Structure formats: structure tokens, C-alpha cells
Amino acid sequence: MARFRLTQAVPVGQFRWTAGDTVADSQANAQAGDHVWVGLNSATMVEGMTPLDASASSMRAASPWANVPLRNVIYGVDSVSS
């Protein structure tokens, strides 16, 4: 189970999820209201994802963002993606 809270907008394929949304790595791990990113792993995750469980923390630790401090604040500008 890996669930993250987004602190910035994230474009994934044809979707664009906004800051404050919650993303899970599979339908089985998702809770009501979560977006499901089937290809989510340590290589595909983005900086603005705050882990919500141990699996998500492990995924972040194995990602390029492992040494970047977590940001739990959402700024309006981060909800805009190009």
C-alpha cells in the first residue's frame, strides 16, 4: 500500500491532479476519493508527493527525491501545471 498527498499539481497521462489530492499506487490500496496511478513507483513519482504510509515512505526513500525535504504546505502557485 502506497498513498501520497500531492503538494503540487501533477500531470499523469491525460489527467492533471491538483495539490491536495491523494494518490494511491493501485485500486486495492486506494481509499474513497483517491486517484489511482497504476504506474506509480520510485522512478515515476514526483517531488511534490508527501507519503501517507510506510510503503509510500519506502518508495520515496528509493526515489530521486529521497534527500529533498518534505513540504507539507500547499501554495496556490503549485496547483498550476504547464
Image (cartoon, rainbow, N blue to C red):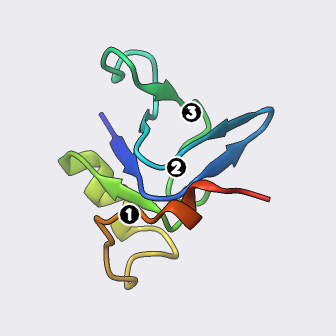
Front residue of 28 and 10: 10
Q: CA distance from mark 3 to mark 1?
A: 15 Å
Q: Nearer the viewer, mark 2 or mark 3?
A: 3
Q: Name the residue carrying label 3.
A: 37
Q: Please, what secondary structure does the residue beneath circle 1 have?
A: helix
In terms of image quadrants, where is residue 3? top left
* Quarter of the figure with the C terminus: bottom right
Task: Decide: is 65 above or below 23.
Answer: below
Asked whether residue 46 is in view, the answer is no
Left or right for 44, reference 76: right
Front residue of 63 and 12: 12
Task: Decide: is 1 above or below 56.
Answer: above
* Quarter of the figure with the N terminus: top left
Q: Residue at x 31, y 73 (%)?
A: 70
Q: Residue at x 62, y 50 (%)?
A: 10
Q: Please, what secondary structure does the residue beneath circle 2 have?
A: loop
Left or right for 78, reference 13: left
**CB within 8 Å, label 2 to label 3:** no
Residue type highlighted by circle 3: Trp
What label sits on residue 41 in the rendered view?
Answer: 2
**Of the image marks 3 and 1, the number of the one nearer the N terminus:** 3
Asked whether residue 42 is in view, the answer is yes
Q: Name the residue carrying label 1.
A: 60
- Please rate how many residues cluster around mark 2, counting C-alpha atoms within 10 Å: few if below 14, some from 14 to 19, many from 20: some
Where residue 7 sits: x, y (%)?
Answer: 43, 58
Q: CA distance from mark 1 to mark 2?
A: 9 Å
Residue type highlighted by circle 1: Arg
In terms of image quadrants, where is residue 51? bottom left
